[in-house]
Amino acid sequence: MLTNTGTPDYKAPELYEGGSYSQLIDLWAVGVMLFEMVEKRLPFRREYLSDTIRSIVEVEYELGEVWFRKSRYARDLMSRLLKPKCKRLSAE
C-alpha cells in the first residue's frame, strides 16, 4: 500500500499529489471503469501522459451524450465517483 503503482488512467488525483491510499482511491477507479464501460473510452485520456495526469488532477472530464440516455441515477453515481477526494462518494 505504500508503493506507487498502477495504471495512470485509473489513479486518483490525490495519488499524483503525494496522498496516501484509502478506500476513496478504489472508488475513483470504479468511477473510471464505469465511465469506460458506458462511453467505451477513458474519461481523462489525452494524447500525452502529462496532459492525462493534469486532467486527472484537475478532474477535467465531460459526460458524453450516451449518459443522457441513461437514468439520472447512473449520471448521479458517475458524478459522485469522479470528484476530488473531499467531495467523493465514500463506502461509509
Image (tube, rainbow, N blue to C red):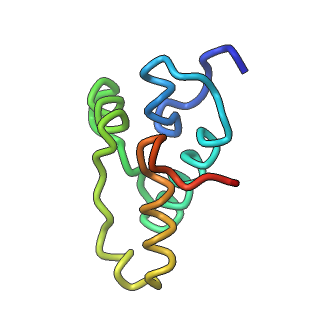
- Which residue sits at x=73%, y=21%? 1
- Which residue sits at x=41%, y=55%? 41
Query: Residue 34, percent across and down?
Result: 54, 61
Residue 1 vs residue 46, the one in the foreground: 1
Q: Is residue 87 left or right of residue 34?
A: left
Residue 89 vs residue 75, the one in the foreground: 89
- Which residue sits at x=55%, y=31%? 7
Q: Residue furthest top?
A: 3
Q: Is residue 37 left or right of residue 69?
A: right
What is the quadrant of the C terminus in the image? bottom right
Q: Is residue 23 left or right of residue 31?
A: right
Picture quadrant of residue 47: top left
Q: Is residue 17 above or below residue 32?
A: above
Q: Is residue 7 above or below residue 67?
A: above
- Which residue sits at x=38%, y=75%? 67
Q: Is residue 14 above or below residue 44?
A: above
Query: Residue 73, percent across and down?
Result: 50, 79
Q: Is residue 51 above or below residue 39?
A: above
Query: Residue 70, percent across and down?
Result: 44, 82
Picture quadrant of residue 16: top left
Q: How many marks?
A: 0
